Amino acid sequence: MRTLAEPVSGEFVRVEPADEPGVRVNGIPADLDHTQKADVRVDLYDERTRAFVVEHVLGPLRLCGVTAADVVGTVETWAFARPEHRFCYSTDLGPDAVVSHPAGLPNPALADAVCEGDVRTPTEETRRSVREPVSYAANGGEITVSPRDHGTGVTLELRFEDAQFACEVPPEGAAGETIEAVTNATTPYLAPSPEEGVVHAVADVLSDVVVIGGLDDVHIEAELAAAYHALTIGVARRAAEEELVVERTGGVP
């Protein structure tokens, strides 16, 4: 696993080193078992609390090569124009349960802080892929996740409306220009163009398929449409439910 050597802070969240694999957001594991909502956003839930719009934290972490972390929301002020804040207020949760950027960005300040920090890298690790291509369709979109060799990381080919974007995210993280482009791109629901929206979607797809779905070495090809988190979480669930996820251990490239 790759975790930070020291805590860092971005806007709206603090990220602390982890002693075990995986990411937790306000103490909730970012995995399929704890994914409560997946449509226009992704929320995590346990019997104690809920974390809202987690894709805007999980995506930047993976872009920067971090696969193990404890994320803590730091927002102290209510913003009732946001539906997530109204939900939290009505259910006795604090504003710190919402860990996303209000402008619909994948937290560029967090990405900057993480990429500037020191990341502890293992000498050997267990990584997951799929046994064979896994496809899923939802809300007018389609996605296929295919296996890649151990230690090669993630490649993405995404399409949204008439725009497309492709990039590579190796285990150690994406190239600096890719991280900057993705984390400064607005969500498709607010973006001025599909060209910007499809770049933003890289963070969302990484969050859902790679972090929450637990797939480290895969190629992801997707035609995105409305409420596409149902698509991305859906393909990860299918891979798990059909027992198509495989674990492989080896040296770190």
Image (spheres, grey):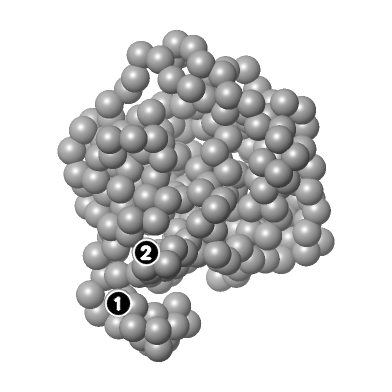
* Tag of residue 27: none
Residue 105 location, quadrant: bottom left
* Residue 203 seen: no
* Tag of residue 99: 2
Amino acid at the residue labelled 2:
Val
Q: Secondary structure at mark 1?
A: loop
Pick whichever of labels 2 and 1 is earlier in the sequence: 1
Q: Secondary structure at mark 2?
A: loop
The residue depicted at 19 percent of the width and 44 percent of the height is 7
Q: Which corner quadrant holds the C terminus?
A: top left
Depth check: 27 or 88 in front? 27
Please, is residue 84 above or below residue 187 in the view?
Answer: below
Amino acid at the residue labelled 1:
Gly
The residue depicted at 72 percent of the width and 26 percent of the height is 131
Query: Is residue 68 toward the left or the right of residue 130 in the image?
Result: left
Residue 43 location in percent, x, y? 50, 64
Query: Is residue 253 toward the left or the right of residue 114 in the image?
Result: right
Residue 50 location, quadrant: bottom left
The residue depicted at 30 percent of the width and 77 percent of the height is 94
Binning the other alpha carbons within 10 Å of mark 1 as few (below 14), some (14 to 19) or many (20 upward) gives: some
Residue 85 location in percent, x, y? 39, 80
State the residue lying farthest toward the front.
Answer: 47
The residue labelled by disc 1 is 94
Depth check: 81 or 17 in front? 17
State the residue lying farthest toward the left.
Answer: 6
Please, is residue 11 above or below residue 149 in the view?
Answer: below
